Amino acid sequence: MFGALTLPPRLVAQAVEDLHTLATALRELTEPRGDLHRLTEAARKLPKVEDELTAAVKSLQVDVARVPDVVQPLNDRIDSLSEQLVGIDEDLRSLDQDMADLDKDVARLDGNMQGLDKNLVGLDKNLVGLDKNLVGFDDTAKSLDRSMAGLSGQLTTLTDEVQGFRNDLAELRDKIPGL
C-alpha cells in the first residue's frame, strides 16, 4: 500500500491523464454518432453488401465463361492478319528487289540522258548551220521563183508566137493545096 504512495507525482499525473483519454475515447465510441455506432451500422449492412458482391462475382463468372467465345474469333482474325502480314512481308522483299532494279535502270537512263544532252548540243550546232543553209536556200528559192516568173512570161510569149506560127501555117495550108 505504501508503494502507491511512493510513486512520483509525474507518473500519477500521467496515469490520470491516460485514464481521462480512455474515458473520452469510450464516450465517443458509444455516442449515437460515434465510431462504435458507425461500426454497428456497417456490420448490419454487411450481409447486404456480401449478397451484392456475391451477385457481382457470379455475373463476372458468367462474363468470364463467355470470354473464350469472344476471344476465339479475335484469335482467328489475328492468325489471318499474321498470314497476311507474312504475304505483305514477302511482297515488300520483292518490292525491295524491284526498287533496286529500278534504281539500276534509272542510273542507266541518267547515263543515256547525259549522252543525249551531249548529242543535243551537237544537234543544236548542226541546226544553227542548217538554219544558215535554209536562209541561203530560201534566198535561192526566191531567186528561182523570180527566174520562173520570168521564164513563165517568156514561155507565154513563146506560146503566143507558136500559136501565131500555127495560125500562119494553117492559112498557108489553105492557100497551098497539097500541104
Image: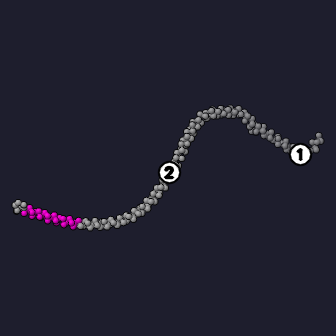
What secondary structure is the stretch in magenta mostly built from? helix
Amino acid type for the residue under numbered disc 2:
Asp
Residue 159 drawn above or below residue 83: below
Regarding mark 2 in the picture, which secondary structure is present there? helix
The CA distance from mark 1 to mark 2 is: 99 Å
- In the shown orientation, is residue 164 left or right of residue 112? left
* Residue appearing at x 61%, y 34% in the figure: 68
For the C terminus, the quadrant is bottom left
Which contiguous range is marked in magenta?
148-172
* Residue appearing at x 55%, y 40% in the figure: 83
List the single residue furthest toward the front: 178
Question: Of 81 and 119, which appears nearest the observer?
Answer: 119
* Residue appearing at x 61%, y 35% in the figure: 67
- In the shown orientation, is residue 144 left or right of residue 8? left
Query: Could you classify mark 1 by the number of other residues whose Cα lies within 10 Å: few (under 14), some (14-19), or many (20 or more)?
Result: few
- In the shown orientation, is residue 127 left or right of residue 42? left
Quadrant in which residue 135 is drawn: bottom left
Residue 70 point in image, percent of width and height? 59, 35
Q: Earlier in the sequence, mark 1 or mark 2?
A: 1
Q: Which residue is mark 1?
A: 11
Amino acid type for the residue under numbered disc 1:
Leu
Can residue 59 be seen? no
For the N terminus, the quadrant is top right
Regarding mark 1 in the picture, which secondary structure is present there? helix
Chosen colour scheme: one colour
Query: Could you classify mark 2 by the number of other residues whose Cα lies within 10 Å: few (under 14), some (14-19), or many (20 or more)?
Result: few
Residue 168 point in image, percent of width and height? 9, 64
Residue 57 point in image, percent of width and height? 66, 33
Q: Which residue is mark 2?
A: 101
